[in-house]
Image (cartoon, grey):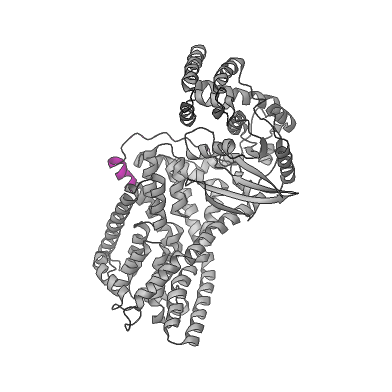
């Protein structure tokens, strides 16, 4: 079966990933680009006699050398021998989207335009002449709706045709005779070196005029680089004399002039455009007074839905593990093997898997908010707060919100920030966001101590994380990261109904990652906890005389001022540094035998299980303080490793360990002693 390699390219929020999910379904995987920490989504589908390998390129607005995503996208087009590039374009925002299209045309990419969101364009009374647009661009234009199968078959047929009969998309690109003439002069010199002809000489000439650092460095390796730069200086000087602008500005103006010309010929818009649903809703959602309260209400609803809907399923899984533990205990009796299976494996891993319903629902809620276009608004409304209090702009809030799912992709999301100083500072505060790995800890403690207020308690922890992150960022900004903050420019996507298929795929992928962690890291930790709880031979399992009990006893005085000075919480926190779910797994392993193999997860009917055990170790006040400490202290090993990769230094992970540990201790201390003064117990 012949393979066609297809890259999906486009601006953020144009439906690119939705189309990718629609085309590939579950036949895709996510990894990293070679040598990069940027995620790479690849999938495939069979069409006629072909296998289409689909690569979802990073969403970006240009193909410059300013961000990792832009470099990856253009490297793929230039170096990866892609057969076809499908450029997804938002029909309601053609002028903005086609700017990226012109840059891919400069590369001479074998291009297809997939015109998305046509239903929204028609609602705005846009009349787009597809044939005329295609003729003017010199590439096929296919109307699609990424959210469903509209145009899907025609797009696949066009991909097949383009792969067998490639098009040089640069032919119809017109930038005016003056610029064309001088680019041609520069091309003539570049073409003397065959090693510079991997991409078109025209594109290389344009990039040199735009002062592209990567292309400039590449040309410097040429044996004729002096001749090229002499010609470059000559062209630059002439253009500045003629236009009184820099070459970058001149090229950008010509690109927009080309786009304006083709849109005049192919698109008709009403003289007065009626306000769209997005514009009407944004009057309230992005309002300077209502924006933040609306954000808080939405987050509160997310937690209410998560815990209210998830509770029955959680109890069902809990009951299943309880039954399984009882059966194994009854069959094997009180043996080492029975203890290993019930206390070590079922207790450690099963105790964490009990919380799958809560985790899945949280991922589902975040995916819906992200795909609907709301998360961009949350960043927008937080811009003023972030800028005034911290000195960071709202773009920093996007990784923070993504941190509600998992800290690792949230840290990676900081790569979209232009300035390294702001990027590292954002990395350092992302771990204060309450990721889903902490949810099992919250679920355990709210079930044991705050049954009537589960959603409200968890909501308070998420808000506390944001507040602490802003305060810590403000302190770091005035000490380690002094400097002027860059302005915040962000395009707000149109609201859209999230694709059911896309949301389910996102939820499944993230939930599967949680289950894999339970089967690897958490399993390994559970086995270690069981071994340490069983040694030295002859001691009661999980007692203070065991190795794990002795470790906890040594560490417990550290946590005494925070109200939880028993050895079991100390051990749970120490193991939780590896992964936060292990806090619950440790409690599950330690208290499995004490409950005679029953109630190894969270609260069961009658108050059995770990809930009963932790009620003997904590009060409502100290339970809340413990959750605060789990929220704020050292992030998991995976997050620390990601920061090491992103910064290429151990300096910043070590600084993060110090900052998070000190912050967790100070905030927990204040809440505990403040609570005592207010009469809480």
The image position of residue 535, as x and y in percent, is 33, 78
- The residue closer to the viewer here, 8 or 469, is 8
Q: Is residue 625 left or right of residue 144?
A: left
In front: 152, or 73? 73
At horizontal 23% and vertical 67% (from top left) the residue drawn is 557
Between residue 187 and residue 264, name the one nearer to us.
187
Front in this rendered view, residue 96 or 412: 412
Q: Quadrant of residue 11?
A: top right
Q: Residue at x 35, y 78 (%)?
A: 534
Point out the residue furthest to the front here.
223
Quadrant holding the C terminus: bottom left
In the rendered view, tell whether residue 519 sits above or below residue 301.
below
Any part of residue 428 in sight: yes
Q: Magenta part of the protein: which range?
A: 471-491
Q: How many marks?
A: 0
The picture places residue 382, in percent across and down from the top left corner, at 43, 43
Q: Position of residue 164 (x, y in %)?
A: 73, 39
User: Compared with residue 320, is residue 417 higher up or lower down, i.e. above or below?
Assistant: above
Query: Residue 433 placed where, x, y %?
Result: 41, 53
5 horizontally vs 37: left or right: right
Confirm whether residue 453 shows in the render: no
Is residue 485 within the magenta segment? yes
Residue 240 on the magenta span = no
Horizontally, is 217 left or right of 133 in the view? Answer: left
């Amino acid at each position: 079966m012949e393979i066609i390699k297809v890259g999906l390219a486009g601006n953020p929020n144009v439906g690119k990933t939705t189309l990718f999910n629609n085309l590939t379904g579950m036949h895709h995987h996510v990894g990293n680009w070679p040598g990069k920490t940027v995620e790479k989504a690849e999938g495939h589908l069979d069409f006629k006699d072909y296998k289409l390998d689909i690569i979802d390129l990073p969403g970006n607005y240009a193909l410059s050398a300013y961000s990792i995503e832009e470099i990856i996208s253009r490297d793929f087009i230039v170096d990866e021998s892609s057969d076809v590039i499908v450029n997804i374009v938002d029909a309601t925002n053609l002028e903005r989207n086609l700017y990226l299209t012109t840059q891919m045309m400069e590369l001479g990419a074998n291009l297809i335009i997939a015109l998305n969101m046509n239903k929204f364009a028609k609602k705005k009374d846009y009349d787009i002449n597809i044939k005329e647009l295609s003729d003017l661009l010199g590439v096929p234009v296919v109307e699609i709706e990424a959210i469903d199968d509209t145009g899907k078959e025609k797009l696949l047929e066009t991909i097949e045709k383009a792969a067998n009969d490639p098009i040089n998309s640069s032919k119809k690109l017109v930038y005016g005779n003056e610029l064309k003439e001088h680019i041609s002069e520069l091309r003539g010199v570049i073409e003397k070196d065959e090693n510079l002809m991997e991409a078109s000489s025209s594109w290389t000439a344009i990039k040199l005029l735009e002062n592209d650092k990567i292309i400039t460095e590449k040309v410097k390796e040429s044996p004729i680089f002096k001749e090229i730069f002499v010609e470059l200086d000559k062209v630059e000087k002439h253009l500045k004399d003629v236009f009184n602008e820099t070459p970058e500005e001149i090229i950008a103006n010509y690109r927009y002039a080309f786009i304006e010309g083709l849109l005049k010929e192919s698109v008709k818009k009403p003289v007065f455009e009626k306000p769209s649903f997005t514009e009407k809703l944004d009057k309230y959602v992005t309002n300077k007074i209502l924006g933040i309260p609306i954000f808080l209400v939405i987050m509160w609803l997310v937690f209410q839905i998560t815990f209210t809907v998830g509770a029955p399923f959680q109890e069902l899984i809990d009951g299943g593990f309880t039954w399984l533990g009882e059966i194994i205990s009854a069959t094997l009796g009180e043996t080492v093997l029975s203890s290993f299976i019930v206390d070590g494996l079922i207790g450690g891993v099963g105790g964490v898997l009990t919380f799958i319903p809560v985790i899945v629902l949280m991922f589902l809620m975040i995916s819906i908010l992200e795909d609907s276009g709301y998360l961009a608004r949350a960043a927008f409304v937080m811009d003023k707060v972030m800028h005034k209090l911290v000195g960071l702009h709202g773009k920093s809030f996007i990784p923070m919100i993504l941190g509600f799912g998992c800290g690792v992709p949230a840290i990676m999301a900081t790569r979209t920030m232009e300035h390294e100083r702001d990027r590292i500072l954002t990395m350092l505060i992302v771990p204060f966001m309450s990721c889903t790995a902490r949810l099992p800890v919250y679920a355990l403690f709210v079930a044991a101590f705050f049954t009537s207020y589960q959603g409200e308690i968890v909501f308070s922890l998420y808000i506390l994380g944001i507040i602490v992150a802003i305060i810590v960022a403000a302190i770091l900004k005035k000490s380690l990261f002094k400097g002027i903050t860059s302005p915040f420019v962000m395009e707000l996507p149109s609201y859209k109904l999230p694709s059911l298929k896309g949301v389910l795929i996102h939820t499944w992928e993230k939930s599967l990652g949680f289950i894999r962690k339970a089967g690897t890291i958490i399993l390994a930790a559970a086995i270690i906890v069981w071994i340490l709880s069983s040694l030295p031979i002859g001691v009661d399992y999980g007692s203070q005389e065991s190795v794990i009990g002795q470790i906890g006893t040594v560490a417990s005085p550290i946590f005494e001022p925070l109200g939880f000075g028993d050895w079991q919480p100390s051990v749970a926190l120490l193991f939780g540094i590896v992964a936060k779910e292990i806090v619950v797994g440790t409690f599950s392993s330690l208290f499995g035998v004490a409950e005679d193999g029953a109630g190894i997860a969270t609260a069961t009917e009658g108050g059995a299980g770990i809930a009963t055990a932790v009620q003997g170790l904590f009060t409502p006040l100290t339970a809340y303080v413990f959750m605060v400490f789990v929220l704020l202290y050292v992030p998991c090993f995976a997050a620390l490793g990601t920061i090491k990769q992103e910064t290429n230094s151990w300096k910043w992970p070590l600084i993060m360990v110090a900052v998070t540990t000190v912050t967790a201790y100070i905030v927990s201390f204040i809440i505990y002693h403040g609570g005592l003064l207010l009469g809480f117990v």
